[in-house]
Image: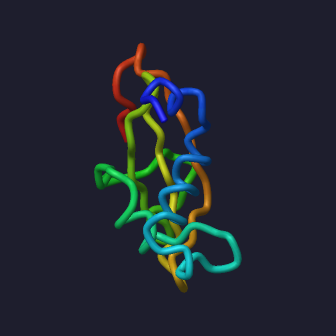
Amino acid sequence: MKLAAFHSLGLAALISVGAVAVKADEALDGHMTYEIFERTVEHADLAGCPPEFDIETQFCRMTLAAERAHVFVFDYAGDQPLQAVKSYDLADGLPAF
């Protein structure tokens, strides 16, 4: 598959493919856990999260793709499931929180 074809795929689809390719048996009921994300997605750890998320119960990671910053929000509890994904246009610079 050519690299250009990856740009047409959604970010969630790429993450799902990565999770399946690396270790599909660890995906719990089809949801992304931080353990799987950590091993399959190049990302940066963030010290904070967007203001609408509670940093006492959630933590955030960021990826850069297709001229956008994508912030992934995970829950600290349990198997640390993915709670939300927010995307920001890089034309405005990197998000600060």
Residue 80, given in percent of the width and then of the height, sits at 51, 76
Observer-nearest residue: 13 or 33? 13
For image coordinates 57% across by 71% down, the residue present is 81
For image coordinates 29% across by 50% down, the residue present is 44
Residue 79, given in percent of the width and then of the height, sits at 52, 82
Observer-nearest residue: 52 or 41? 41
For image coordinates 35% across by 66% down, the residue present is 39
Observer-nearest residue: 7 or 11? 7
For image coordinates 35% across by 35% down, the residue present is 96
Residue 9, given in percent of the width and then of the height, sits at 60, 35
Above/below status of 77 relative to 70: below
Above/below status of 39 relative to 52: below
Q: How many marks?
A: 0
Q: Quadrant of the C terminus?
A: top left
Above/below status of 73 relative to 71: below
Residue 49, given in percent of the width and then of the height, sits at 43, 51
Which residue appears farthest toward the right when viewing the image? Answer: 29
- The colour mode here is rainbow
Above/below status of 4 relative to 59: above
* Location of residue 20 (image quadrant): bottom right
Which residue appears farthest toward the front when viewing the image? Answer: 1
